[in-house]
Image (tube, grey):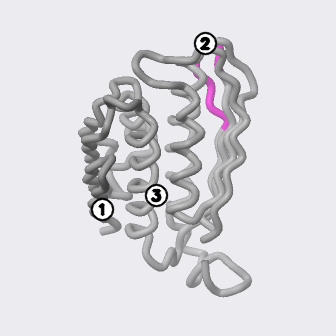
Amino acid sequence: MRNSEIVRKTKETDINVKLEIDGSGKSSINTGVGFFDHMLTGFSKHGFFDLDLTCKGDLEVDGHHTVEDCGIALGEAIKKALATKEGIRRFGDIILPMDDALVLCAVDISGRPYLNYDVKVTEEKCGDFDTCLASEFFYAVSYSAGMNIHIKQLAGMNGHHILEAAFKAFGKALDMATGYDNRIDGVLSTKGSL
């Protein structure tokens, strides 16, 4: 069973994450930011990850600490659940359509953080979510999980569709990268470690 639990408590947020890599896409998400909950639910469903995530954050300030710290905690949960990374495909990618939006996502669970986020949403908000925070979330995940994440918008006009395509694409690409390949002996690296 590849699962983990992360508790992260600061003066700004109190977060609890439970993650099952080999799940069925069940989730229970409550961050206090409805649109962000919707995005994490889509990530879980389309990546087939079982995800319980709760966050009590300083939303009276804004959503920044909540979104960023949830990214940190989720990245830590991914890293812990994958442990030695033996037998995983390591790489995953998809081009995902959602109505007018078309988003490419590629990941490498390399042990090295890197984010290339090329997404342009013209709306400042989707519901109660500041759209500029999506890049903060993905950066936090990439840094704390130790993975390369490339997200590129190929088409799209509607901010909701673009961001939802990005989160779903990340789930699908990560599902592919965390999947097993029985041809892999140890880890998929010429260096012998990830």
The numbered mark at residue 143 is none
Image spot of residue 142 (x, y percent): 57, 56
Residue 99 shows in the view: no
Residue 52 shows in the view: yes
Amino acid on which the number 2 mark rests in the picture: Asn
The numbered mark at residue 158 is 2
* The residue stretch that appears in magenta: 95-101
Camera-side residue of 194 and 37 = 37
Query: From the viewer's perspective, is residue 153 above or below residue 185?
Result: above
Label 3 SS: helix
Label 2 Cα crowd, 10 Å radius (few <14 / some 14-19 / many 20+): some
Residue under label 1? 6
Horizontal side, residue 72 vs residue 142: left or right: left
Amino acid on which the number 3 mark rests in the picture: Gly
| Sequence-first tag of 1 and 2 | 1
Amino acid on which the number 1 mark rests in the picture: Ile
Count of numbered circles in the view: 3
